Image: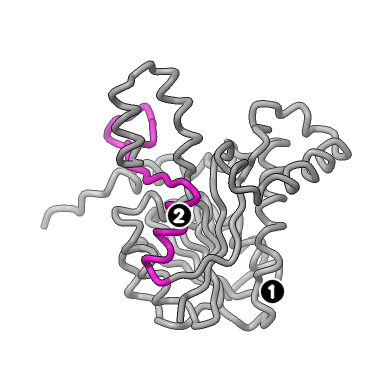
C-alpha cells in the first residue's frame, strides 16, 4: 500500500513545528496576542463545563489560554507534529482533559455534531483549507445553536504591497480577481494556497455558510510589526493598544490591517 501524500500545508507545518514558537516571541507578538485575547474574552462561554475547540491549534498557544481559563479543549490540526507540540505543552500544565485530533477542517467527522460552545480558528486556518466554505459548514455543524466561532482571515487589501514589490501587474490583477495567493516558503513543494478576503467578502463567506456576524475587527490597523521597538516599553505599549482599539472596528481602517478577526454565531 502506498503512503498517503501529505498536502503542502501539512508538510510545511510538520517541518516547522519544533521551532514554530521562536518566530512569534517578541514585543510585537505579545502586544498582538493581548489584542487578540481582549477580543476573545467577552465571547467566552459562561459555563466552564462547555467544551471548546481550537481549530488549527498549532503548538497550543490558545488551547493553553483556554485551558487555564477552566475549559476543556479539543485541539484540531492537520499537522501531527503541531499536535505533538500542543500535547506536550498542555501536559506540562497538568491538563489531562484536553483531546487532540488530526483532521482537515473540511472533514472533522470524528468530532460530535452540535457539541461545542466555542470554536477558535486563529492564524487563518480556514483560509488555508482546500475549501473555506466547506470548512465553515463543518465548523457550524460542530457548534451548539448558541455557540460562537472566533476566526481570523487574511485581509486581501493588505497583500497588495507584496505585488507592488515584485512589480508584477499580471499577478496583482489575478490576485485581486481571485483573492488566492501562496504561502511563500523556500521549498516550492511546501507552498500552499491561501484565500484572502475584504471585510465585505468575509461577511458574505460566513453568511453563505449559515453564520451571523457578531463582531469584526482589523488586526492590526497600526503597522506595529514594522515598529517593534515602540512596544518594548510597557507603558508605551498600552498607549499604542488604546489607539489601536480606537481604530480596529472602523471598516475603512480595516483595509490597513493584516488580518480580520471575526466573531460569528450559527444562524437560525
**Apparent side of residue 148 relative to residue 132 in the rendered image (left or right):** right
Cα separation between marks 1 and 2: 31 Å
The correct choice, above or below, for 160 with respect to 5 in the image is: above
Q: Is residue 205 magenta?
A: yes
Instruction: Give yes or no for residue 197 being in the magenta stretch.
Output: yes
Residue at (67, 58) in percent of width and height: 39
Q: Position of residue 173 (x, y in %)?
A: 32, 29
Q: Is residue 63 above or below residue 222?
A: below
The residue pinned by badge 2 equals: 202
Looking at the image, residue 251 sits to the left or right of residue 235; the answer is left
The quarter of the picture where the C terminus appears is bottom left
Q: Is residue 47 left or right of residue 85?
A: right
Say which residue label 1 marks: 70
Q: In the picture, which quadrant includes the N terminus?
A: bottom left
Question: How packed is label 2: few (under 14 Cα within 10 Å), some, or many (20 or more)?
Answer: many
Q: Which residues are magenta?
A: 182-210
Outermost residue, front direction? Answer: 252
Nearer-the-camera pick, 240 or 268: 268
Amino acid at each position: 500500500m502506498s503512503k498517503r501524500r501529505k498536502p503542502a500545508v501539512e508538510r510545511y507545518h510538520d517541518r516547522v513545528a519544533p521551532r514554530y514558537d521562536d518566530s512569534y516571541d517578541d514585543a510585537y507578538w505579545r502586544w498582538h496576542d493581548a489584542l487578540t485575547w481582549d477580543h476573545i474574552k467577552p465571547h467566552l462561554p459562561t459555563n466552564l463545563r462547555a467544551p471548546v475547540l481550537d481549530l488549527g491549534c498549532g503548538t497550543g498557544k490558545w488551547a493553553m489560554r483556554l485551558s487555564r481559563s477552566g475549559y476543556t479543549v479539543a485541539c484540531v490540526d492537520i499537522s501531527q507534529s503541531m499536535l505533538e507540540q500542543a500535547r506536550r505543552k498542555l501536559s506540562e500544565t497538568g491538563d489531562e482533559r484536553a483531546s487532540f485530533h488530526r483532521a482537515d477542517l473540511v472533514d472533522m467527522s470524528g468530532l460530535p455534531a452540535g457539541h461545542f460552545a466555542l470554536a477558535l480558528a486563529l492564524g487563518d486556518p480556514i483560509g488555508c483549507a482546500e475549501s473555506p466554505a466547506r470548512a465553515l459548514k463543518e465548523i457550524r455543524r460542530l457548534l451548539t445553536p448558541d455557540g460562537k466561532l472566533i476566526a481570523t482571515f487574511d485581509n486581501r487589501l493588505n497583500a497588495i504591497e507584496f505585488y507592488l514589490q515584485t512589480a508584477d501587474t499580471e499577478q496583482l490583477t489575478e490576485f485581486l480577481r481571485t483573492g488566492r495567493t501562496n504561502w511563500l516558503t523556500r521549498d516550492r513543494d511546501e507552498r500552499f494556497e491561501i484565500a484572502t478576503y475584504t471585510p465585505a467578502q468575509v461577511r458574505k463567506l460566513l453568511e453563505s455558510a449559515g453564520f451571523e456576524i457578531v463582531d469584526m475587527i482589523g488586526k492590526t490597523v497600526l503597522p506595529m510589526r514594522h515598529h517593534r521597538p515602540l512596544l518594548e516599553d510597557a507603558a508605551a505599549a498600552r498607549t499604542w493598544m488604546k489607539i489601536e482599539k480606537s481604530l480596529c472596528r472602523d471598516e475603512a481602517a480595516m483595509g490597513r490591517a493584516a488580518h480580520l478577526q471575526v466573531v460569528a454565531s450559527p444562524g437560525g
